[in-house]
Amino acid sequence: MTSETRPRLVGDVMVREVATISPMATLREALREMRQKRVKSLVVEKAHPHDAYGILTYTSILRTIVAEEGDIDLANVYDVMSKPAISVPEGMEIKYAARLMVSQSIRRVIVLRSDDLVGIVTMSDIVESIMELAER
């Protein structure tokens, strides 16, 4: 199969530079990290090898800020993150990742290779990939 006929895989469109954070970090630290890295989410690191990854998004932080009436120092990443984060293998076809994201109403999934974090893919990454194919 040539690259023209081979299905596009998650590994082809994922972002490899993933911003991560400790589950014990404060929300203030998480917001600072998001601002510095110019990202809308952080992958929360595993606490131990058999643990699951988590994910922290601007939306989850905003919900907490509203609930706590603006005091972000009352919670840490562990309190706010979604865990386990939904993940897909890097060899999955993007159409299946897109179906998963739509069915679960999520905007991003983490990408794993043998249970190790190798990337993140967002709905925007997938749409951009589809647009590239359509323009050819």
Image (cartoon, rainbow, N blue to C red):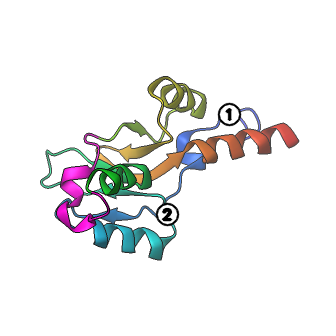
Can see residue 59? yes
Q: Can you say whether 134 is above or below 19 in the image?
A: above
Above or below 37: residue 46:
above
Task: Tell me if residue 93 comes above or below residue 131 in the rendering.
Answer: above
Residue at the limit of the structure toward the front, as seen here = 69
Which residue position holds label 2? 39
Q: Is residue 72 magenta?
A: yes
Amino acid carrying mark 2 in the image:
Val
Point out residue 106 in the picture as x, y percentages from the top left corner.
47, 36
Query: What stretch of residues is rendered in magenta?
Result: 69-84
Picture residue at 70% right of the left edge, 46% below the top: 128
Q: CA distance from mark 2 to mark 1?
A: 30 Å
- Nearer to us in this view, 16 or 113: 16
Where on the picture, by quarter, is residue 58? bottom left
116 left or right, relative to 124: left
Rendered location of residue 107, percent (x, y): 51, 41
Side (left or right) of 134 relative to 12: right
Mark sitting on residue 6: 1
Instruction: Name the element at disc 1.
Output: loop
Q: Amino acid at mark 1?
A: Arg
Q: Is residue 93 left or right of residue 34?
A: right
Q: Position of residue 94 (x, y in %)?
A: 58, 34
Of labels 2 and 1, earlier in sequence is 1
Relative to 45, say whether 2 is above or below. above
Residue found at the far right of this picture? 136
Q: Is residue 26 visible?
A: no
Q: Mark 2 or 1, which is nearer the eye?
A: 2
Instruction: State the image coordinates of residue 66 (x, y, percent, origin top left).
Output: 34, 53
Q: Viewer-proximal residue, 23 or 18?
A: 23
Checking the image for residue 62, the label placed there is: none
Q: Residues within 10 Å of mark 1 (few under 14, many from 20)?
A: few
Q: Residues within 10 Å of mark 2 (few under 14, many from 20)?
A: some
